[in-house]
Amino acid sequence: MPGNIFGNLFKLTTFGESHGVAIGGVVDGCPAGVEIDLDAIQKELDRRKPGQSAIVTQRKEPDTVEFYSGIFEGKTTGTPIGFAIHNTNQKSRDYSHIKDSYRPSHADFVYDKKYGFRDYRGGGRSSARETASRVVAGAIAKQFLKDIKINAFVSQVGDMKLGKKYTELDLSLTESNPVRCPDLEMASKMEAYIKAIKKEGDTIGGIITCVAQNVPVGLGEPVFDKLHAELGKAMLSINAVKGFEYGSGFEGVKMKGSAHNDKFNSDGSTITNYSGGIQGGISNGMDIYFNTAFKPVATIIQPYETIDKKGNKVQTQGKGRHDPCVVPRAVPIVEAMTALVLADFKLLGRTSKL
């Protein structure tokens, strides 16, 4: 199974399954001398871990990361950074009912058809538990990026959508509630809605908005390696993601060019920012902002019809501990993948200038 490596110079390779002994990864290409705050890395993991509130899966995992290489006396050595997070609260029996059948809209069917074998316990490699490794690597990338600020937040759950732009919000309030929405009134409504969906044994999707500030001019390449293309790839590699738009996105089609064009200030900054901080695939120094859409989680805790390995129609019901809405826990994942993309382009920018 290829496709376990992300990045060009700042690379992450992940390993492990949801119900295996551990998950983990290797970060390769991080320059030497980067000061590493291990507590800050653990804090990022704590934002993603299960069991942190009543609106997420109740799987109880401490998600404590252990580093094995690449860090000495609080700084990176320039060698590969190896780490692992041990799984301690698996309940594989919760998945025995899908050993020979497939959950609709899940990776079960295609894994079986492609590889002729699958780890049905929690989805194995297709489980979102793999993203914990991305959060660790992203936390390292954030510390390499230093002055670049990356903030993601939940802007929509179902049809409940924030009516404010990110510039009108106090993003410091994002972590003040379990939904991770910086508008506290809307956060309360979203939380109640997610709890109602959970009570029905169903799931709901949502949107995460991410903002990267203080990004220097010049990250990205003009043809195939466009900055927004790599951000889109990064977001679409996250479990349950169905869409990505940056800047004005799909709303931009409603505007005329005369209104959509970002007029320049004398210093090269722009009066508006419909470009989303990226022009011609290259960062222009303005805020980079984008939306990532997540579908409702495929595993629902209610009866449903599906097929077994022989193609027979069967009735089954979801079991175990699952997120009724994935977006609150996905906020640090979106930030992590953003950091990995920006870190990679920062290193690529160093090599492209003669």
Image (tube, rainbow, N blue to C red):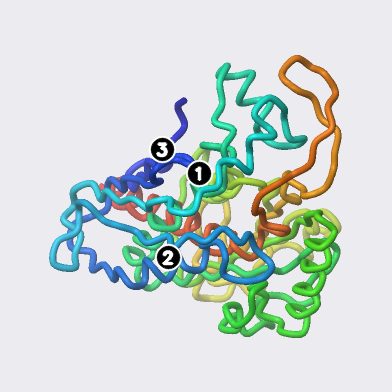
Q: Residue 300 got which mark?
A: none
Which structural element holds mark 1? loop
Residue 113 to residue 277: above or below: above
Measuring 82% from the left and 69% from the top, which residue is drawn there?
A: 193
Q: Residue 216 got which mark?
A: 2
Where is residue 74 shown, x and y percent of the image?
19, 68
| Disc 2 residue type (three-letter) | Pro
| Disc 1 residue type (three-letter) | Ser
- Circle 1 is placed at which residue position? 18
Where is residue 89 shown, x and y percent of the image?
49, 54
Separation (CA) of disc 2 from disc 1: 37 Å
N-terminal label among 1 and 3: 3
Q: Nearer the viewer, residue 179 or 303?
A: 303
Where is residue 99 shown, x and y percent of the image?
64, 29
Q: Is residue 281 visible?
A: no
Which structural element holds mark 3? strand
| Disc 3 residue type (three-letter) | Ile
Separation (CA) of disc 1 from disc 3: 18 Å
Q: Nearer the viewer, residue 155 or 298?
A: 298
Q: Is residue 311 left or right of residue 8?
A: right
Of circles 2 and 1, the one toward us is: 1
- Circle 3 is placed at which residue position? 5
Number of numbered markers: 3
